[in-house]
Amino acid sequence: MNSLDNITKSFVEQSQNILEDNLVGIYLHGSAAMGCFNIQNSDIDLLVVVHEDIPDEIKRRYMDMVVELNAYAPKKGIELSVVKKDVCNPFVYPTPFELHFSNAHLEWYEKNPSEYIDKMKGTDKDLAAHFTIIYHRGKCLCGKEIRDVFEKVRREFYYDSIWCDVKDAEEEIKENPTYVILNLCRVLAYKEEGIILSKQEGGKWGLDNLPPIYQSLILQALNEYSLNEPIELDNDCAHNYAAYMINQMKE
């Protein structure tokens, strides 16, 4: 069950059964859509688009399904957001969402599902990045085609979204080095060249475009991300790298 294809197939079928005519479409983004999915290091990134508000009882059924399926997913699990079609085109930023789930929220849902259903809604700047990946490189798993649902996200919205994800890199790089190292590369690649990359592609861009002093650090991150080889972090080098990358972005 825990293969990517099996998980997404089951997710689509059960979503169609629960959401019925309210479902507009389901879209795959992230590493699974960009050809660099790693069962140890990647989550399954899904965006669900609906026509109208989802009643709380349907949200509860839907979340129970997601949590049950998440138990069979790879280690990092399923990450999904549910949004309404009317925030996709014209695009709204920061983007309102109807429901969200990831492994980080699993304990909250299991302890107090009613509170979760009531409070798990709002706006999320990350959705600008997800919409951009879907528009340019995503996969429609069911429902309306991508260009019939989404408009192209404006550059300033996408860049603000990905900048918010890395602006604290100097503090976060020691805690999550591989993610931060590769993410900094793909954000700078977009700032300088306007190219939309996966983390793995960003790391390869970094090897070709960043000072040689950081190549070993980036190569280690790439090897952990794609080959599951543990990274041996030089804390000083990592901090200097993060500071250098943030300064390049601020320029």
Image (tube, grey):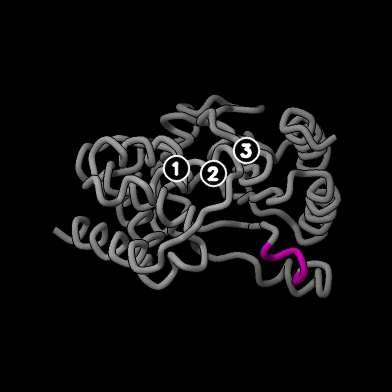
Image coords of residue 163 (percent x, y):
33, 58
Q: Earlier in the sequence, mark 3 or mark 2?
A: 3
Query: Would you say 213 lies left or right of 13 here?
Result: left
Q: Amino acid at mark 2?
A: Tyr
Residue 49's image quarter?
top right
**Residue 75 in magenta stretch:** no
Number of callouts in the render? Answer: 3
Q: Which mark is residue 38?
A: 3
Q: Residue 199 bears which disc, if any? A: 1
Point out the tag, 2 or 1, that comes first from the N-terminus: 1
Query: What's the CA distance linking mark 2 and mark 1?
Result: 9 Å
Instruction: Residue 148: tell me if it is visible.
Output: yes
Check the image and name the residue furthest to the left: 251
Amino acid at dot 1: Lys
Name the secondary structure under disc 3: loop
| Marks 2 and 1 in Cβ contact (< 8 Å) | yes
Taking the spot 67% from the left edge, 57% from the top edge, the residue there is 102
- The dot on residue 132 is none
N-terminal label among 1 and 3: 3
